[in-house]
Image (tube, rainbow, N blue to C red):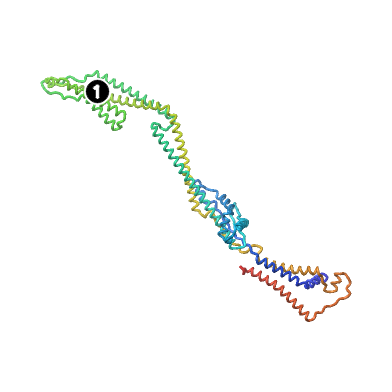
Amino acid sequence: MNDLLRPLFNLLPAMWEKRWWGLAVAWVFALLGAFGLAVYKERYIATATVYVDTKTMLGPLLQGLTVQPDVSQQVDLLARTLLARSNLNTIIDENHLLKPGATEIQREFLIQQLAKTLHININGQDNLYSISYVSNDPQKTLGVVRSLLNLFVSNGINANRKDSEQAVHFIDSQIAIYDKKLRDAETKLKQFKTAHPGYSGQAATDYYTRQAQLQDQLTMLQGQLSSAASSRDALRRQLADIKPTLAPSLLPGTNIVMAPQQSEIDQRIAAQRKHLDDLLQRYTDAYPDVIATRQTLARLESERKQQLQHLANAPPMPPSVSAQYSEATNPIYQQLRISLAQADANTASLQAQVSDVQARLAQLRTQATQMPKLDEQYIQLNRDYNVLNDNYQKLVQRRESAMLSRNQDDSRKLDYFRIVDPPRLGPTALFPRRTFLIALVLMLSVILGLLTTYLLVLLVPTYRNARQLRESTERAVLGSITLTLTPAAALHEQRNRALFMLGSGVLVVVFVVWTLINMLHLTH
């Protein structure tokens, strides 16, 4: 056992002789380390986490009524462009990261540094977005993360709001344009219909249908007119075979004379007036039957005037005869005359209707050459109007959807972005902390001091006894001289030993106290 420990026993005294060199190296390294630790700044990290809610209860309820953008894709793009130069300049100005009067080169360097040290972690599957930043100033570190989080949330909300406003503004401008075009198309269509009042606005097939209908109506009216004319002629033949008056009906020996009867033409006029009153109760003055009845009534009144004028010019009857008797009108004759007058009126009415239908049919046939061109113009005008109207209605619906989407975004506001973990600063500085570095400098100082003494022992070896000299040189030792210290030398040795212990103790105590102070955060 002694053989194993003998080299150590020989080494320690030799190193003790070189102790001042080791202490000097330890102090030099400790002072250099202390200076480095004094200028060393610990690094702090600040983090924040945001959850983006892309699925809400309003989505299924408003499906088809509003525009549902891909919020996830928008937020991913926003997160990837969050470290844009404009945003970094905003962060620098808000947190006063540059001193007043800083140059553009310093600003550019700080922007590059922020772009490297700011990290945004995107977890698209869970819609979580984490922001982290590391720097030497804890308050500015927290402020940078807070500013970046505010930019992330506000830019997302403002982007949706801006998109909605731009969409509504664009749709409103298009609606105004299409409204003007639609009014112009309506005006052209109205002018076309005003210029061609008889045109129904249908295709050419409708023209031939109308022509066929008028032709059928004309054939029917001509048949009715033929039947009416035949009935009228039959009444005329019957009337020609019947005497208008009966034999005188006078009683013998009396002067009683039968009252004169109403003339035949007056009865016909009365019948026509009654017929005219019935027609005016149902139709207007422009109706063909009304016009024909008026014409018949005018003709009968003209005939009555002629008869009255003829009677006025005829010689008067003998008094004996007028006093004796008067002729009686035949009632059958009068009835036939009334029927004849009605037949004349019916015939005239049918004749007027036939003339009207013939005129309309002739006008329709005259327009036959213009119909294809009119059809083409009308189809073109109608097609333009329908296209403009459809686009106008679609734009109105899109505007309602855009406004509803904007109102939905306004009602939700910050609901899209939920701050799961607000901006917070880490409880301790990042590794390596100053406490660890102080202990490390103390340990390295001690190790370097010991290593220095060991190297000096190897380079300049000394021997404490004859055995050590004989074993090292493998030569015979003839003799040895023992050193005996005088009292003064012993006192000097004690003083040196005390100074060495004091120097070593001060070194250790200073670093230990410094370590404890940093551990207790007494310097912060």
The N terminus is located in which quarter? Answer: bottom right
Q: Position of residue 137 (x, y in %)?
A: 60, 63
The answer to whether any part of residue 424 appears in the image is no
On the rendered structure, is 81 left or right of 213?
right
Q: Residue at x 71, y 73 (%)?
A: 505
Q: Nearer the viewer, residue 205 or 193?
A: 193
Q: Is residue 524 left or right of residue 228?
A: right
- The kind of secondary structure element at disc 1 is helix
In the shown orientation, is residue 437 left or right of residue 415?
right
Q: Residue furthest bottom?
A: 487
Question: Measured from the top left, where is residue 59 in percent x and y?
Answer: 52, 49
**Residue 51 position within the rendered picture, expressed as x and y whole percent measured from the top left:** 56, 55
- Quarter of the image with the C terminus is bottom right
Q: Relative to 166, does residue 298 appear above or below in the rendering?
A: above
Residue picked out by circle 1: 337
Query: In front here: 235 or 482?
Result: 482
- Quadrant assignment, res 38: bottom right
Residue 477 falls in which quadrant of the image? bottom right
Disc 1: CA contacts within 10 A as few (<14), some (14-19) or many (>=20)? many
